[in-house]
Amino acid sequence: MTSTSSASARAFLWRSSIVAALGGLLFGFDTAVISGANDTLKALWDLSDARLGFTVASALIGTIIGSILVGWPTDRIGRRDMLKVLGVLYFVSAVGSALAWDWYSFLIFRFIGGLGVGGASVVSPMYIAEISPAPSRGRLVALAQFNIVFGILLAFLSNYIITQLKLGATEWRWMFGVEAFPAAAFFLLLFGTPYSPRWLAARGRNEEARAVLARLDPDPAQVDRELAAIRESLDLEHHRANEPFYCRKYLTPILLAFMIAFFNQASGINAVLYYATTIFRMAGASEQMAALQPVLLGVANLGFTILALFVIDRLGRKKLMIVGSIGYILSLGVTTWAFFTYSGEFAAVSDAMKAVAEAQKSGVSAETVDGLKATLQSLLPPAAVGGKYVLMALVVFIASHAFGQGAVIWVFISEVFPNRVRARGQALGSFTHWIFAALISQTFPMVVGKFGGGAIFALYTLMMVGQLVWVLVVMPETKGVPLEEIQKKLGIE
């Protein structure tokens, strides 16, 4: 085995992983892009808090369905070809959302995008896990998470740039439409990636599986060992490929996947991402600052995700979760305190902003508008003090998520299930993740409208105390353990 062949194999492995992880970039972009358009959509279609929540959750309903249904076709047509289908869904959603002619058509196209997000949350990390050697699997699977947060940052940055272009009534359409370009690129790049060798082996295509493994690792002996381990784990002579999933044998990985996915959303992460601009407006930020501050969240998200990529295979999954949980508790606690302490100042600024906007629309005299603006300016400084606490706390919150849950969840779920049921296990974890994301996104504006920001962030804080206990007491470490041995470690024969 020459150094040249080793370098070529590594390059092929990284190139294939990066292309698959682009599904995560589209996942992140699609998730966060609506945060810049919430207020516009609410005004455009005269949406109540409940209907706004449903508008945001419409994509998540598609995500739930996509995540739970994607397992069967992924096993039938393969991980790579399923990613192509998801690329088409992203493209159709982007173009359709941009051209939506009413609220109902917008909901339909966002739902289609949700199908793509749900599918990508299952297939991208699963595909990468199945082509990766154990020593570097954490870093490579975490590429999907890196691209998710890079997509989130791109969405926030894109929204901010579009608001600065002053495109008027079409501004929100451009926010959604730009996603069509990376969606098309993702689809085309997939033609240069291989099938998963574990999927090929499961279909009885052993020589093709060996050929792919040889491109990923030029050592023939290692290829033979890898293929033998895959065959043993699949145990095709003694296990049916369609054996029952929900049974006592798989109870441990099912519960692990469910709990990590539940706690991921119980932190409120998707509420913060979907309503970032709204939250900063609630905290007294001006129109321009409310559009800019989510970009700071995106930068923190990306930076700490990169840091997690470098240490996840050294420190392990569990240590990252402990650090992230402590960061969650501290940052959410400060956010809760700020919203309770400065609620009066925040409410005064919000009311003043609404008064200015309504006055400008109604065509009252310039003197009246100027007077309302002067009142608003006088209210901004005291609210800005509390707003700084909220901004700093949410930056820490995002950093904690990126370093802990964000980096670990998809890696961990892709590791704890045996090969023969990994697609269904990944789908279960993703389904759990997205069902709670939909519930939180649907209820966030209603809870805030009735009880204020402090109450909802207090609930998230309490949930993260529960996560810390679960990590310390229950969560196993999977760092550096081959996929075929993890099932033995969890007591699965």
Image (cartoon, rainbow, N blue to C red):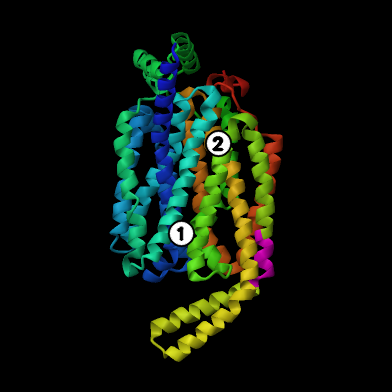
Three-letter code for the amino acid on which mark 2 is drawn? Leu
Q: Residues within 10 Å of mark 2 (few under 14, many from 20)?
A: many
The part of the chain drawn in magenta is: 335-343
Q: Is residue 434 left or right of residue 450?
A: left
Residue under label 2: 309
Q: Position of residue 418 (x, y in %)?
A: 51, 24
Q: Is residue 390 left or right of residue 158?
A: right
Vertical position of residue 91 compared to residue 471: above or below: below
Camera-nearest residue between 489 and 279: 279
Alpha carbon separation for disc pair 2 and 1: 27 Å
Q: Residues within 10 Å of mark 1 (few under 14, many from 20)?
A: many
* SS at badge 1: helix
Q: Earlier in the sequence, mark 2 or mark 1?
A: 1
> Of all residues shown, which one is farthest toward the top?
221
Q: Is residue 212 visible?
A: yes
Mark toward the viewer: 2 or 1: 2
Residue under label 1: 35
Q: How many numbered tags mark residues here?
A: 2
Three-letter code for the amino acid on which mark 1 is drawn? Ser
Q: Is residue 424 magenta?
A: no
